[in-house]
Amino acid sequence: MPDDSLRQLGRLEEGGFRRLAARLALLRAYAHHRENESLSGVQAQEETAEAFDERTAAVDDWVYDVYDSVTARTLRRWARQFRDDGLQGLIDRHGRRSERSYDSYFGAGSELRKVALHYLADHPDCTSTELLDALAEHVDEEELPTRRTVQRFLQKVGG
């Protein structure tokens, strides 16, 4: 592991480390399911995401405390990030995002706000993970807010 990855791991707060460990646990469950059932990557990701949402995935209970939901698209993104950048690819990218305010993402007239509101019109009961995945289809990874920022957005528009 490059020195840069070790430095990043050393700087992770407990929540960031738990998210990293949960992502690894979910990717492990996906990989085992794919191999054990001789499935395509897409099929294994879909079935792993469905099992996770039904709380029957092959992960420890604490992972459900970290993520309330996961989609096949999220698993695909994590698998790609891990393949491309190793462990460093799964570490939260808050360093680039933390400089931005909530309003810079979801302020009146912002592109993300428009996309999010259109998505919510069609999916009023979506989770923050699902909304974040929908937003990821419209902007680059670097422009995405954190899942917590999306949760705050959902709380503000939902009640």
Image (cartoon, rainbow, N blue to C red):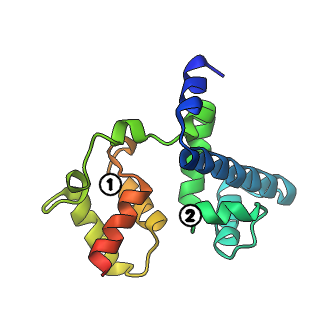
Crowd around label 1: few <14 · some 14–19 · many ≥20 (10 Å): few
Front residue of 62 and 142: 62
Q: Residue at x 58, y 51 (%)?
A: 76
Position of 114 relative to 25 (above/below): below
The percent position of residue 33, horizontal first and vertical second, equals 79, 58
Residue 43 in view here: no
Report which quarter residue 94 is drawn in: top left
Q: Residue at x 63, y 36 (%)?
A: 83
The percent position of residue 62, horizontal first and vertical second, equals 70, 61
Residue under label 2: 71
Front residue of 8 and 114: 8
Quadrant (top left/top right/bottom left/bottom right) for the N terminus: top right
Q: Residue at x 54, y 56 (%)?
A: 74
Q: Nearer the viewer, mark 2 or mark 1?
A: 2
Side of 19 where 129 appears, left or right:
left
The percent position of residue 99, horizontal first and vertical second, equals 28, 40
User: Could you tell me the amino acid type at mark 2?
Assistant: Thr
User: Could you tell me the amino acid type at mark 1?
Assistant: His
For the residues labelled 2 and 1, the Cα–Cα distance comes to 17 Å
Side of 29 where 150 appears, left or right:
left
The percent position of residue 145, horizontal first and vertical second, equals 35, 52
Q: Which residue is the extreme one toward the top?
A: 3
Position of 87 relative to 47 (above/below): above
**SS category of the residue bearing label 2:** loop
Going from N to C along the chain, the mark reached first, 2 or 1, is: 2
Q: Residue at x 35, y 49 (%)?
A: 144
Residue under label 1: 138
